[in-house]
């Protein structure tokens, strides 16, 4: 699956900070993430984990107060951090596409979707009617019924599920090398969610793009993604192939997180397991391991020294001093 | 469950966020604007300490250039321009701030009624306000003052009629936007009644843009007053308003430019001061922008 | 003991279109909730489940007195409710926790003021230290009292919402999608909090959600809604083991799961939820039902009672899901 010779995306030692009135927020610290050609990677983390910040960094769409303080983001070998706005503009929408959580933000409410889908092809060859045909074909691929007439409708005339499919169609029309999907199914009901991830899987097989799928829904990652990356408080703490990591997670946060998943708890229980404690203050970071304050297994080494990335079990990356330690569970 | 060991020995890297006033003053525009306004206010307050009575005529000394005795020179009747300007500051500020505040209140009330009331009332008020806005200020002033006769109150009334609709519109738009906001519904779900919701939950969110608009309007009102006085429809002589000084100054511009300077300079200073302040105020009022 | 809440024949409609639409013969109102009956008992947790457009949020809001033209009868503690007359007093007994936690908090108020609001609104004195006590109850540190809503995380804002809901000691708490947008650990914390409070204060909890994983654990009973009607209602465990209505079965199976084997038994639904303006004939689900039969298209199904369970289907599923 992973082609180590040519990853589509290779984030290396990325650190990013924000300047705020209350101090410097160390939003990302030494993040290492790799996506191979045609791979679907699920990026999981709660709000505050930095997954959105990482996505913004990859797309170079960060707030003006953000600075990359270390590391590189290599897209097909080129460093996006050094690329500058013109370079990025050439890539975005062509080699890198994005699908957002709220399809209304991707779709212009005052233009018909046909118009938008034709406009988006501005880099591609062909006259108006060719582009229109391509758009209709794409709509058919994402199973919008009666695409010829639907082209002349406005976004608000479609349901949420259909809008998301249109957004996916638009993102994939240029056949990008990498699709970044930011919580695309979070706002959808379970039935639509399943239909959407099935669609993504189908299209991905056909187009061969890599997908970075950002979510906090573990079940979706299990169904769709080849690999899973877990973030906590600005750091990537574990990374590996999906099912093996689900079966044998190595980082304490991952282990505890999985044991909190109500879907994975057999017996119905009134009192659900939770990790306890709070996210650390990203301005005033604790010394040592970022998870130590909440880790049941933390010792003095954990509290004083930052852990490095190890390989352990089936995971390619575990940022822990004791990745081989027995698995932690929370008893409900 | 988890061992929460806190290392208290290291000092926190978290800074205290600055207060709104501190932010305002640290912004160069805001500081400058505030300084200019303070200057004008002080001038108005100290008007009684002026070296000469503003109406004291001294024909011998007409059109004198600025000197140690007369800081801004004298006008066509020998009156000390500096003293006249100081007294004029009082009128300018009183009218501009007073009339603006009144327009704000009237506009606010109308806007709330339009935003919350039934659709037909909203449409009616919009119609009336748009009609008023389409009448040029001078014409409106003419119409009104022909009826009431020129005076300070006439000027105030003109200002309210001219500026009120602007505030009403902004208020109405904000009210319409916030009316269905989730937090308003939450307050309703707790049992809050209309007045409480308007006063505590809608007003604070509206006042920001309104006060900024007011700050920007004050120099405009100074201009309106000056203009109306210039046209003889405002303050009557010998009361010194910057507008009348300017008016007289234009008539005698060949004899002395100092009258025009004396009339015009304070208008410019006040306008700049309030405009800068308005821009800086915009940043302080939005709590989210404070994070930047 | 009487039921805390008794709802009979509840329908909620919204006016739609103006004069011109009506002149053209179009619909003038949308029946978002089209006839619902259920009871809620003190100390129980009930889940209202359904997709977007099912009417579950509208139903819950109608019970809390939040809008729409309400028909039918709602009895609270034995007395029939008249929103206009009892509205204000009712707000103290029925508390509503909104889905978007941060937006439901007035942006210029501090957390402290927000929690004191309910007292001030009803002219009640806020006892000394009550705000601190409530913050502690919902697991928030006292420093949070000085923060503004936009400075709170999603989980923190949700807890403030819970604290506000509890200030006036309600008897019924309605939570709209309390787990939306939260990761599994924070979800557990919020649900545990609601559950503990339910036990300690004897509250009834009505949870609106489309997260079935959570329903399985925390709800005593569940009701499944489609196009504004209940298709099935009963004890959670029994429904999960053996759903009777095909829609229930489809929803239960539409869960992205970790175990690959579970995916094969999935029931896929065709199409999307039909529009409320053009309600289907007969059984309103017939257009998407994988087990549809001729009579489903023409006749509305009767209500069937099976013990404490109720469902409306001509050809209910039999047996257990695990077969």
Image: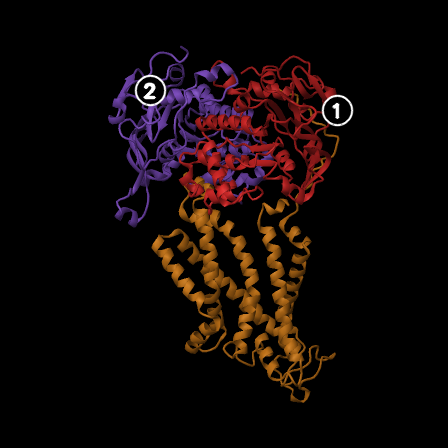
Q: Is residue A21 visible?
A: no
Percent coordinates x, y for residue B230 in the rendering = 55, 78
- For mark 2, does the 10 Å Cα neighbourhood hold few (<14), some (14 to 19), or many (20 or more) residues? few
Taking the spot 59% from the left edge, 23% from the top edge, the residue there is A276
The orange-coloured chain is labelled B
Percent coordinates x, y for residue A212 in the rendering = 59, 30
According to the picture, the residue beneath numbered tag 1 turns out to be A304
The red-coloured chain is labelled A
Query: C115 or A55, which lies in front?
Result: A55
The purple-coloured chain is labelled C
Q: Chain of mark 2?
A: C
Percent coordinates x, y for residue A59 in the rendering = 63, 38
Whether residue C219 is situated above or below residue A129 in the rendered picture: above
According to the picture, the residue beneath numbered tag 2 turns out to be C291
Taking the spot 69% from the left edge, 14% from the top edge, the residue there is A324
Q: Which secondary structure lies at badge 2?
A: loop
Percent coordinates x, y for residue C188 in the rendering = 52, 23
Query: A170 or B154, which lies in front?
Result: A170
Q: Residue furthest bottom?
A: B60
Q: Is residue B173 visible?
A: yes
Q: Which secondary structure lies at badge 1?
A: helix
Query: B252 or C255, which lies in front?
Result: C255
């Amino acid at each position: 699956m992973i082609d180590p010779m040519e990853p589509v995306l290779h984030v290396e030692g990325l650190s990013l900070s924000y300047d705020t009135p209350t101090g410097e927020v160390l939003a990302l610290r030494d993040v290492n993430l790799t996506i191979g050609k045609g791979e679907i990677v699920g990026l999981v983390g709660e709000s505050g984990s930095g997954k959105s910040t990482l996505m913004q960094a990859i797309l170079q769409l960060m707030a003006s107060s953000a600075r990359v303080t270390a590391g590189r983001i290599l897209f097909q070998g080129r460093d996006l951090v050094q690329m500058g706005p013109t370079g990025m503009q050439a890539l975005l929408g062509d080699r890198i596409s994005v699908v957002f959580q709220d399809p209304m933000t991707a779709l212009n409410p005052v233009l018909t979707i046909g118009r938008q889908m034709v406009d988006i092809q501005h880099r591609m060859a062909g006259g108006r009617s060719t582009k229109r045909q391509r758009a209709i074909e794409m709509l058919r691929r994402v199973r919008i019924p009666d695409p010829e007439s639907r082209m002349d409708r406005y976004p608000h005339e479609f349901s949420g599920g259909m809008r998301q499919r249109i957004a996916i169609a638009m993102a994939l029309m240029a056949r990008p090398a990498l699709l970044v999907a930011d919580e695309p199914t979070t706002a959808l009901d379970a039935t639509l969610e399943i239909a959407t991830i099935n669609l993504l899987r189908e299209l991905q097989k056909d187009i061969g793009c890599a997908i970075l799928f950002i979510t906090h829904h573990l079940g979706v990652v299990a169904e769709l993604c080849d690999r899973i990356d877990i973030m906590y408080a600005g750091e990537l703490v574990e990374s590996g192939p999906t099912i093996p990591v689900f079966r044998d997670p190595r980082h304490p946060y991952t282990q505890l997180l999985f044991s909190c998943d109500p879907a994975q708890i057999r017996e119905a229980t009134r009192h659900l397991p939770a990790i306890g404690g709070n996210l650390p203050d990203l301005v005033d970071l604790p010394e040592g391991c970022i998870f130590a304050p909440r880790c049941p297994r933390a010792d003095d080494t954990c509290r004083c020294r930052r852990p490095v990335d190890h390989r352990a079990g089936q995971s390619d990356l575990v940022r822990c001093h004791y990745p081989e330690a027995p698995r932690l569970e929370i008893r409900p | 469950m988890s061992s929460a060991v806190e290392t208290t020995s290291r000092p926190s890297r978290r800074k205290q966020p600055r207060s709104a006033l501190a932010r305002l003053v640290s912004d160069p525009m805001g500081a400058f604007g505030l300084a200019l306004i303070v200057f004008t206010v002080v001038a108005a307050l100290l008007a009684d300490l002026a070296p000469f009575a503003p109406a004291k005529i001294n024909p011998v000394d007409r059109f004198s250039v600025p000197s140690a005795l007369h800081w801004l020179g004298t006008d066509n009747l020998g009156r000390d321009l500096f003293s006249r300007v100081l007294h004029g500051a009082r009128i300018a500020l009183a009218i501009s701030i007073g009339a603006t505040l009144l327009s704000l209140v009237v506009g606010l009330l109308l806007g709330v009624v339009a935003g919350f009331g039934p659709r037909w009332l909203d449409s009616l008020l919009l119609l009336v306000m748009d009609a008023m806005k389409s009448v040029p200020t001078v014409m409106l002033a003419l119409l009104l003052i022909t009826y009431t006769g020129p005076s300070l109150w006439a000027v105030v009334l003109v200002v309210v009629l001219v500026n009120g609709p602007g505030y009403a519109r902004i208020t109405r738009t904000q009210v319409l936007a916030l009316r269905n906001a989730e937090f308003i519904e939450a307050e309703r779900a707790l049992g809050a009644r209309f007045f409480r919701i308007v006063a505590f939950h809608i007003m604070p969110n509206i006042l920001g843009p309104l006060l900024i608009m007011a700050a920007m309007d004050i120099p405009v009102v100074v201009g309106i007053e000056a203009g109306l006085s210039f046209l003889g429809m405002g303050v009557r002589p010998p009361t010194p308003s910057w507008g009348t000084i300017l008016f007289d100054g234009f008539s005698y511009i060949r004899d002395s430019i100092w009258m025009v300077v004396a009339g015009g300079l304070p208008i410019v200073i006040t306008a700049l001061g309030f405009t800068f302040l308005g821009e800086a105020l915009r940043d302080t009022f939005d709590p989210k922008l404070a994070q930047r | 003991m009487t039921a805390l809440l008794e709802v009979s024949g509840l329908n909620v409609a919204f006016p739609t279109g103006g004069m011109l639409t009506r002149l053209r013969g179009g619909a003038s109102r949308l029946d978002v909730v089209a006839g619902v009956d259920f009871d809620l008992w003190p100390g129980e947790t009930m889940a209202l489940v359904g997709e977007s457009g099912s009417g579950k949020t509208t139903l819950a809001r109608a019970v809390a007195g939040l809008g729409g033209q309400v028909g039918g009868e709602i009895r609270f503690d034995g007395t029939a409710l008249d929103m206009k007359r009892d509205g204000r007093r009712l707000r103290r007994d029925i508390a509503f926790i909104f889905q978007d936690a941060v937006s439901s908090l007035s942006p210029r108020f501090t957390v402290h003021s927000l929690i004191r609001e309910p007292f001030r609104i009803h002219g009640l004195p806020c006892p000394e230290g009550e705000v601190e006590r409530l913050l502690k109850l919902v697991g928030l540190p006292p420093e949070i009292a000085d923060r503004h809503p936009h400075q709170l995380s999603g989980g923190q804002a949700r807890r403030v919402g819970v604290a506000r809901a509890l200030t006036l000691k309600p008897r019924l708490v309605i939570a709209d999608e309390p787990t939306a947008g939260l990761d599994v650990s924070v979800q557990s914390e919020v649900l545990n909090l609601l559950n503990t409070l339910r036990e300690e204060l004897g509250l009834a909890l009505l949870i609106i959600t489309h997260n079935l994983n959570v329903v399985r654990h925390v709800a005593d009973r569940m009701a499944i809604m489609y196009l504004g009607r209940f298709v099935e209602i009963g004890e959670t465990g029994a429904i999960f083991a053996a759903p009777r209505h095909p829609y229930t079965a489809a929803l239960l199976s539409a869960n992205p799961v970790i175990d690959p084997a579970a995916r094969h038994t999935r029931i896929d639904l065709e199409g999307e939820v039909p529009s409320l303006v053009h309600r289907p004939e007969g059984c309103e689900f017939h257009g998407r039902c994988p087990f549809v039969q001729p009579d489903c298209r023409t006749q509305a199904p009767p209500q069937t009672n099976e013990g404490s369970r109720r469902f409306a289907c001509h050809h209910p599923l039999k047996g257990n899901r695990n077969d």
